[in-house]
Amino acid sequence: MAGLWTGKGVLRRKPFEQIEETGGGEAGQLTRVLGVWQLTAIGVGGIIGAGIFTLAGAVANGKAGPAVVLSFLVAGIASAAAAFSYAEFAGLIPKAGSAYTYGYAVLGELPGWFIGWDLLLEYTAIVAVVAIGISGYFSFLLGSLGIDLPAWMLGAPGTGAGHRVDLFAALLCLLIAWLLNLGMRNAARFEMAVVGLKVIVVIVVIVVGAFYVRSSNYVPFFPYGVGGVFAGAATVFFAVFGYDAMSTAAEESKDATRHMPRAILYSLAIAMTLYVLACLVLTGMQRYTEIDRESGFSSAFQSVGLARLADVIAVGAIIGILTVMFTFMLGVTRVWFSMSRDGLLPKWFAKTHPVRHVPTRVTWIVGAVSALIAGFLPIVEAAELTNIGILLAFVVVCAAVIVLRYRRPDLPRTFRTPGMPFVPAVGIAFSLWLITFLAWQTWVRFVVWFLVGLVVYFAYSYRHSELAGAEAGERAPE
């Protein structure tokens, strides 16, 4: 029993020299087709979404006022601390799985298992939540055009009179699964086009809005005090990650050791620049007390007589949020694929398409599960399934990069986290601090999912993992 908790038990680690050999065989293999800017587009697609179109207005109105720009900067700095750690690992371990793979290689099988297990639920729930949000925008736009849809298809049970299913949200989940199954090259082209359109919309908002900024709207700059800035940072932090899901595509990068670190940092830098400029324009165009919490930019442009541009922004918000679904569904399918290939889940799930070289089976399963969540759960209940796993993944990655730097300083690193160990320690501290803001229902969900995972691990994964097979081979008599 004592050996269970050793390097030959649940804390066994795959040697770094063997990680690059993983792939092929029965499980199938992914194809390296993504360049640095395609990876960056996937990262930007995951980061810029509801945060810029919804959270900015909500935080400005109720938490930080014009200082919302500082809330985004604080959250961005904290997110960058984790991003540096992800970048170091992405250059060091160019394999699918992201935080799961990093945790498995450095901290051991059981810690890696739990991060992967939790991300399966977190990422799937994010896809569903975003789909529900887009559905709400879509229904609003149709209503403004005088198009009335049957009540039964407009929302999950309990969200309105006659609601039976959020049909549009469910179909969106299946659409993203279909796009991902076309093959990574084609899916990445779609993502780049949509992200490009989203960035253009944001730039138009910034440039046009700058002509309507009034300096008097910035006074007082701290209406809720400095505490409001940090409270706002805790809220908008969930708008400044997405690169973590993008890093799961390392195995589909043409030159992952060089491209992945750059793409992670580029995507966060581009997103933060746009966030800061957009927040300055938003709070400069309209007094913070008058900003609409649900559609801040649309209301701001309506307030200065640009109603048509406000409609364009609403359409841009729908398109922009769609890319978030793409990034996180990509993330969950690659984590699942990686766990199955390692033997922690049945290898049947790791089978890839013989021509398109994508994990078709897990992609359709995730599409169907996210469609069921989006179609039949209210957005608040679906949102309670998110957040905690991603924050714990940040903690694991930041801790692992410190451990590995001192355990294996000899490993070739194409990117090195600056300010070691202070910078990753900031990522750990900020993530743990944000976890304290989560509702008790989130903790209940996490504990239940944790216990289910514990059962699955000891009933199946511990005995079937690739490392378990290697240990059995070592013990076998000659």
Image (cartoon, rainbow, N blue to C red):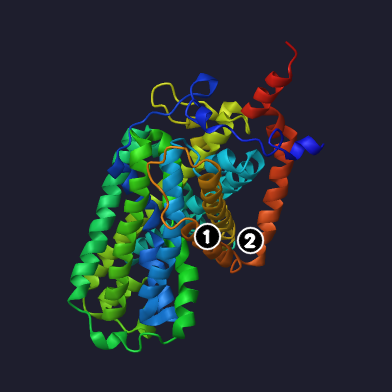
- Label 1 neighbour load within 10 Å: few <14, some 14-19, many 20+: some
- Residue at 35 percent of width and 61 percent of height: 142
Tag of residue 284: none
Residue 85 horizontal/vertical position (percent): 46, 51
Viewer-side residue, 304 vs 346: 346
Q: Is 297 located above or below residue 29 in the figure?
A: below
Residue assigned mark 2: 442
Vertical order, 466 against 429 (above or below): above
Count all numbered tags in the image, as a single digit.
2
**Element type where label 2 sits in the image:** helix
Amino acid on which disc 1 is placed = Ala
Quadrant assignment, res 7 = top right
Q: Residue at x 43, y 46 (%)?
A: 88
Nearest the viewer among 65 and 478 is 478
Vertical placement of residue 378 versus 292, above or below: above
Q: Amino acid at mark 2?
A: Thr
| Quadrant the C terminus occupies | top right
**Horizontal and vertical percent for residue 201?**
25, 60
| SS state under label 1 | helix
Residue at 72% x, 38% y: name it. Answer: 6
Q: Is residue 220 left or right of residue 452?
A: left
Identity of the residue drawn at 63% across and 61% down: 442
Residue sticking out furthest to the top = 478
Q: CA distance from mark 1 to mark 2?
A: 25 Å
Q: Which residue is mark 1?
A: 425
